[in-house]
């Protein structure tokens, strides 16, 4: 059974204000994820009006579709487009929301043609989650940087080998293209747009009501950057993805082999041939590398971080961490806090890059 959401009746809300500072048209792709859409549209809603009235005053938005048929999200909730595809020149941004890729068409020919028309009209295009795949399909990302979640990093490389994805930051603004890794980062993109068009106070108002302390900059790191994009063996690439998805509860080598329908010996040989170390050692190093990232980017306790990285207790994590990095977790945290001046975005980005490169060197 699926839930559904129908467009509001004329009596349900005030018509969009002609003088709105920010206008957005959403296009929902089959299998879209609810969180990026909800986070983005709620940020607009809360910035659009005083209090909790939700009138479309400072911001206006609509949901377009090439048909009026409900679009099913990745969790089964359906949303019916409010209007057919309109002249994209009417909007400041066309926001495409993607999601599940398996057995889903990236976009219909009508949507592809519409996005190309938006490009010709000079309307900025935003791709949330896997919508980056659709923008690439439409030929709209040539010469542009393209952000994608680490979760779908290898999917993009396999489908579009000529595109170099950015998977170590939350979103990328490149001229008339904005691409976002998805998830809660969609709220950061929306807040960035609200601040740009309506002012910082309205962006802060939206986020505070959404219980978000402050917007994250575009260059803020994703929780788990992709690794070893040069892996050629598909078995190893898929195994690495499994490891990345089970960092807090590591799979055994036998479980990975069964999942990939290969023998344990085949998998171990493939890892050694491709990476120079076995899957168990690779998994251990990756979990410790993730621990380095958490120490550098979060305020979580070492005990919590140890658990998130799949270690039974913090002393075990600390011993393994010191053995690999030559420093204790607490020493790394103190160093990172001292060297990360959050008020200076350029300097912070430089520190982030240094962290990424230093931790990567131990793989």
Image: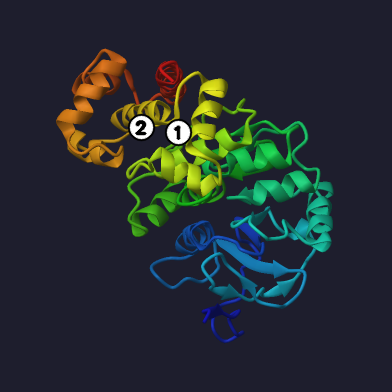
The image's mark for residue 112 is none
* Vertical arrangement, residue 21 with respect to residue 188, above or below: below
* Vertical arrangement, residue 2 with respect to residue 177, above or below: below
* Vertical arrangement, residue 80 with respect to residue 357, above or below: below
Where residue 22 appears, as percent x and y from the top left, is 60, 55
Residue in front for this viewpoint, 342 or 311: 311
Q: Badge 1, how many Cα within 10 Å: few under 14, some, many 20+?
A: many
| Residue pictured at 84% horizontal, 56% vertical | 113
Residue in front for this viewpoint, 313 or 134: 313
Q: Is residue 237 visible?
A: yes
Q: Is residue 216 left or right of residue 159?
A: left
Where residue 53 appears, as percent x and y from the top left, is 44, 73
Where residue 205 appears, as percent x and y from the top left, is 39, 55
Q: Is residue 333 visible?
A: no
Residue in front for this viewpoint, 319 or 354: 319
State which tag comes first along the sequence, 1 or 2. Answer: 1
* Vertical arrangement, residue 189 with respect to residue 100, above or below: above
Q: Where does label 2 land, which residue?
A: 287
Give the SS element for disc 1. Answer: loop
Q: Quadrant of residue 162?
A: top right
Give the SS element for disc 2. Answer: helix
Q: Where does label 1 land, which residue?
A: 221
| Residue pictured at 22% horizontal, 29% vertical | 317
Extreme-top residue of the structure: 326
The quarter in which the C terminus is drawn is: top left
- Of tags 1 and 2, which is closer to the observer? 2
| Residue pictured at 40% horizontal, 17% vertical | 362
Residue in front for this viewpoint, 236 or 99: 236
């Amino acid at each position: 059974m699926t839930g559904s959401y129908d467009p509001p009746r004329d009596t349900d809300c005030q018509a969009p204000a002609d003088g709105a500072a920010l206008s957005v048209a959403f296009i929902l792709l089959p299998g879209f994820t609810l969180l990026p859409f909800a986070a983005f549209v709620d940020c607009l809603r809360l910035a659009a009006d005083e209090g909790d009235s939700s009138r479309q005053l400072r911001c206006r938005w609509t949901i377009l579709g090439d048909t009026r048929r409900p679009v099913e999200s990745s969790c089964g909730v359906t949303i019916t487009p409010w209007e057919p595809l309109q002249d994209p020149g009417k909007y400041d941004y066309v926001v495409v929301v993607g999601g599940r890729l398996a057995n889903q068409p990236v976009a219909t020919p009508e949507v592809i043609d519409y996005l190309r028309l938006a490009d010709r009209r000079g309307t900025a295009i935003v791709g949330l989650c896997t919508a980056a795949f659709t923008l690439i399909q439409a030929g709209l990302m040539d010469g542009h940087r393209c952000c994608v979640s680490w979760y779908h990093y290898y999917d993009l490389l396999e489908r579009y080998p000529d595109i170099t994805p950015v998977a170590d930051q939350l979103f990328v603004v490149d001229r008339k293209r904005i691409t976002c890794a998805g998830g809660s980062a969609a709220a950061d993109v929306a807040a960035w747009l609200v601040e740009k068009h309506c002012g910082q106070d309205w962006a802060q108002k939206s986020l505070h009501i959404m219980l978000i302390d402050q917007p994250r900059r575009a260059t803020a790191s994703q929780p788990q950057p992709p690794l070893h994009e040069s892996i050629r063996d598909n078995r190893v690439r898929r195994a690495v993805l499994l490891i990345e998805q089970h960092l807090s509860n590591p799979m055994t080598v036998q479980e990975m082999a069964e999942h990939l329908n290969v023998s344990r010996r085949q998998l171990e040989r493939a890892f050694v041939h491709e990476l120079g170390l076995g899957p168990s050692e690779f998994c251990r190093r990756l979990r410790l590398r993730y621990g380095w990232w958490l120490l550098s980017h979060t305020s979580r306790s070492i005990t919590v971080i140890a658990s998130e990285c799949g270690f039974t207790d913090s002393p075990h994590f600390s011993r393994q961490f010191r053995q690999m990095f030559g420093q204790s977790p607490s020493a790394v945290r103190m160093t990172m806090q001292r060297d990360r001046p959050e008020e200076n975005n350029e300097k912070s980005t430089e520190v982030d890059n240094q962290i990424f490169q230093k931790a990567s060197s131990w793989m």
